[in-house]
Image (cartoon, rainbow, N blue to C red):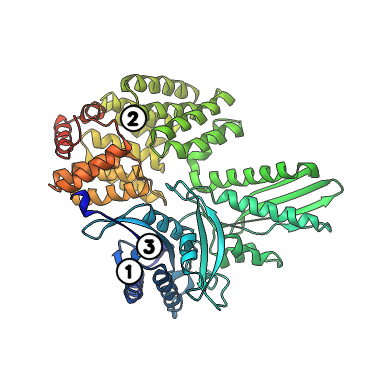
Amino acid sequence: MSGTDHKKRLVAILAADAAGYSRLMSADEGATVAALDAARAVFRTHIESTQGRVIDMAGDSVLAVFELATAAVTAALAIQQELNGGHGDVPADRRMHFRIGVHLGEIIEKADGTIYGDGVNIAARLESLSEPGGTTVSDSVRNAVKGKVSAGFDDQGEQRVKNITDPVGAFWFQKEGSAESKPAAADPAPALTDKPSIAVLPFINMSTDAEQEFFADGITEDITNALTKISGLFVIASHSTSAYKSRSADLRQVGRELGVRYVLDGSVRKAGQRVRITAQLIETNDGHQVWAARFDRDLTDVFVLQDEITSNVVIALQVRLVEGEQARMWHKSTQSLPAWECLIQGLPHFRRFIREDNRRARSLFERAVQIDPQYAAGWVWIAWTHWADARFLWVDTPSAAVDQAAELAGKATALDAQLTDCHSLLGAIHLMRREYDAAIAAGERAVALEPNGTDAAALLAMTLNWSGRPADAAELIQKAMKLSPSQSDWHRAVLAHACRLMGRNDEAVKIYCEAIAHNPNHVGPHIGLTICYADSERIDEAKAQAKALLKISPGFTLAKYENSMTYKDREHSVRSLDALRKAGLPD
């Protein structure tokens, strides 16, 4: 397909998905499929009646475009009104609610109607910010439709969304005159999102000093804002929790009303020039206290105190909800909280698989071991950054980078031989050196140490792919992905690679596209997708992918890539190079 077949234009993009879809499927697969089919019909009817066009209805998601923002908002209002009012006698915990995001932005449209671009990504991110049964729109949509549709808007503030450089202004909206304070309030079922979810209730002023009311409000706002920056965490907007400021409530009931798994609440009490802050994190399904703390400070340190409480809550949640058992193991290998924080801060940079972010990650990991030289996990992750330099051709001498990674892996293993990441790293290093049996053995050791570890299983699957065992790799990575509610782009890339090696090109193309949508700058899925297109004689699409690949990796050549391939069977390398050459990539 030539570049002239691509059109750029400004449209309103609607993205939607079913909240808690996996939970509903596991509870009653037949009823969930029937409910999904009925919901799709509602979406299609209202989208087409407002001159919109359905682009895709894959899985439990919906993607559509409209020429006018007013049409998109009108359709979203009508869809949610019909869906939220159509549950009948369905039990509350079996009802299907959708989240909708709407954005006005530029897209790239191919001749076959497929659309791409930041506009699509932003709409999807807005959808993830919405509450089940509700709709969140960007500031561009709100400005375009204000005064033109009967809808009220609540400001959710500027949101940092994944893979988008600038923050996006977000607004939750509902039909004007609605008595509902939030769309999902009538549904008492908890955990309506697959992401870990939390609501921060307004901290209570326990003193008679009215000025402390502002301090209490500041604590609440700071913690809420900090939590929204944790990737993979669903945070209820403050406009939905403000109703609890003037009334006491059972935290378990609050969790059910707001549809969250965790609730944070606290109090402020002033005595002379001292202030006492208490905070607790509650698991709403059983009232279990996950974390609690008390802070006694001088009033002169109020801003420091706000930062300290926020930091403690964020770390507790990051360990408990986001990184899981692996983060707890990283924490156990150091007594220094600042060292652990540096490691946690570096991980998102490393996982973007971009040269500049890799350097930033290394800087943070190096700071961790400067704080605590005995921190095994810190040395492991420094080693991973050198491994990535070699794997993604970011250095002129990949073998030297692998040697550096191996030296650091040895140091980490000497400090903590039971750390799963040490063995996964050793497996990846053996693979780069084409020591296949040793690579598999190290990967299997990592999985044995952490049977439910998603990354350990994914890294072993990667090794199995290059070692000529794609069927085993596919089985392993699919099991691993079921353990992870938020599947990363590189997990998808490992599965797509297995499918490609087994000759399941159509399946591989779909998964590679999902990986690229998740992280457009990860070079691996672009390479795999280019090969798939060329192997399937979809040459125009292969050439378009090759251009995209060169844009994010300008120095890419077939000679460099040949040195990075670690196939046990040389025939796979030859076929891959032939496909990439067919796509027009330079030798």
Q: For the residues labelled 1 and 2, say whether their Cβ atoms are less than 8 Å apart.
A: no
Q: Is residue 500 at least partly visible in the picture?
A: no
Residue drawn at (80%, 55%) of the image: 211
Q: Earlier in the sequence, mark 1 or mark 2?
A: 1
Tag of residue 33: 1
Out of 465 and 542, give the one closest to the viewer: 542
Q: Position of residue 202 (x, y in %)?
A: 68, 59
Q: 585 above or below 10?
A: above
- Say which label, 1 or 3, has the lower sequence index: 3
Taking 249 as reference, is 98 left or right? left
Q: Position of residue 33 (x, y in %)?
A: 32, 69
> Would you say residue 580 is visible in this rendering?
yes
Q: Quadrant of residue 104?
A: bottom left
Q: Name the residue carrying label 2.
A: 428
Helix, strand or loop status at disc 3: strand
Q: Is residue 304 left or right of residue 409?
A: right
Q: Position of residue 456 (x, y in %)?
A: 38, 38
Q: From what the image shows, is residue 174 above or below residue 453? A: below
Cα gap from disc 3 to disc 2, whole angstroms: 41 Å
CA gap between label 1 and label 3 equals: 25 Å
Secondary structure of the residue carrying tag 1 is helix
**Residue sitting at the far right:** 272
Horizontal arrangement in the rendering, residue 371 relative to residue 384 (left or right): right
The quadrant the C terminus occupies is top left
Q: Is residue 86 left or right of residue 4?
A: right
Which quadrant of the figure has residue 496?
A: top left
